[in-house]
Image: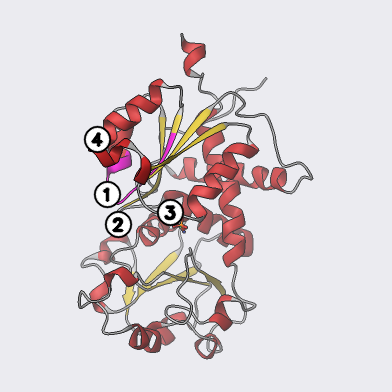
Amino acid sequence: MNKVKGLSSKDLLGLREMPVEDLNLILDTAAGMKEIISRPIPKVPALLGKSICLLFYENSTRTRTSFETAAKMLSANTTNITVAASSAQKGETLIDTVKNLEIMGHQAFVIRHNMSGAPHLAAKNLAASVVNAGDGFDEHPSQGLLDIFTMKEKKGNLKGRKIVIVGDIAHSRVARSNIWGLTKLGARISVVGPATLIPKEIEKMGVKVAYDIEEEIKDADFINVLRIQKERMGKGLIPSLEEYHLLFGLNSRRLTKCKKDVVVMHPGPMNRGVEISSDVADGPYNVILDQVQNGVAIRMAILFLLLSGKSSARENE
Ligand code: CP
C-alpha cells in the first residue's frame, strides 16, 4: 500500500505556525473525505485499531461531536472525558491526566481548554498527537480550516478575495485562526467591531481595521460573523446587546448594500437578534450548516493525516 503523505508535525496546534503545504494538504484530503461522507454507508477502515481521546474542559456542541463523528467514520475508537466528572475536579493536572490516558492506549487527544497554550503543553509531554479544539483566546484551527474549506468550495481560489470578520475580535480564537490561515492563502481581511473589542496592533497580523460595518461589507466576498460573548457583558465592553445589534448586527437591510453573491458565515453558536438577525441566519446568503457539515470532513482529514502512519501503542510493545 502507498505510504500516506502526512503533516510536518505530530500535532495540530494552530494555523499561525502551520506551513501552507500542510494547510493545502488538509484541504485537499478533506475533499476526499467529503466524498466518503456522501456514501450510503459513510465508513472506511482507515483508522481501525486507533484510539482517540476527546478531552473538553469547555462546553462544545459542534467541535466535539464532529471530531467524534469523524473518528467513527474512519473506524477509530473514541473516549469522551467529561471534565466536570473527572479527577480534574480533584486537582489533577492536565499533564498527569493526559499521561494517564496515553498509557491506556490513546494515540491522539483532541483538547479544548479555557487556557491559551494548554494543548501545546500537553503536546510537549506526549508521544501521542494533540489537536487543538480551541484554547482560550488563542486559536481554533479546525474551525479556521473548515471556514477556509467552505469559502474555497463557494468561490474557488481565495487570493485577493475580501473577507470581513465582524464582532468580538479581541476574545475570538476563531478570528485568529481565520486570519492566520487566510493570509497564507493571499486573501484580504478586514475586521470590524466596537473599538473595545478590537485588539491593539491587530494590523500587524496583516488585516485592515474598520468601525463602519455598512461601508466595509459593501464589496465583501465573505462576511464571517462572530458570536457576541454574552458572558463578557457587564464588563464595560458593550453598552447593551440591543445597541450592539443596532451598530454591528448583520441584518437583511445591511445585506441589500452588498455584492449579489456575498456569502454569510457564522461559526456557531449564534445569538439570533444580536450579531445576526434570523432572516440572515436562515436566508439565501448563509452557508452556516455547510460549515458544520464541512467540519466533519476537515476533522476526518486532520485525524487521518496525523494518525494513519502512526502505530498503535500495542504494536510498539
Ligand atoms: N464553532 C464552535 O466551536 O462550536 P462549539 O463551541 O459548539 O464547538
Cα separation between marks 1 and 2: 6 Å
Question: Does mark 1 have its CB less than 8 Å from ligand 1?
Answer: no
**Does the CB distance between marks 2 and 3 fall below 8 Å?**
no
Q: Work out whether residue 6 or residue 289 is closer to the camera in this orientation and state it.
A: 289
Cα separation between marks 4 and 1: 15 Å
Q: Tell which circle, 4 or 1, labels the residue nearer the N-terminal end.
A: 4
Cα separation between marks 2 and 3: 16 Å
Q: Is residue 267 above or below residue 149?
A: below
Residue 10 in view: no
User: Disc 4 vs disc 2: which is toward the camera?
Assistant: 4
| Amino acid tagged 2 | Phe
Q: Is residue 59 above or below residue 227?
A: above
| Amino acid tagged 3 | Gly
What residue did someone put label 4 on?
93
User: Disc 1 vs disc 3: which is toward the camera?
Assistant: 1
Secondary element under disc 2, as helix, strand or loop, is loop
- Residue 194 at x, y percent in the picture: 29, 79
| Amino acid tagged 1 | Ser
Question: Which residue is located at x 49 percent, y 33 percent?
Answer: 52
User: Disc 2 vs disc 3: which is toward the camera?
Assistant: 2
What residue did someone put label 2 on?
137
**Does the CB distance between marks 4 and 3 fall below 8 Å?**
no
Residues in magenta, as a range: 109-119
Residue 206 in view: yes
**Does the CB distance between marks 1 and 2 fall below 8 Å?**
yes
Q: Work out whether residue 203 or residue 296 is closer to the camera in this orientation and state it.
A: 296
* Residue situated furthest right in the rendering: 40
What residue did someone put label 3 on?
181
What residue did someone put label 1 on?
116
Task: Please rate how many residues cluster around mark 4, counting C-alpha atoms within 10 Å: few if below 14, some from 14 to 19, many from 20.
Answer: few
| Amino acid tagged 4 | Thr
Secondary element under disc 3, as helix, strand or loop, is helix
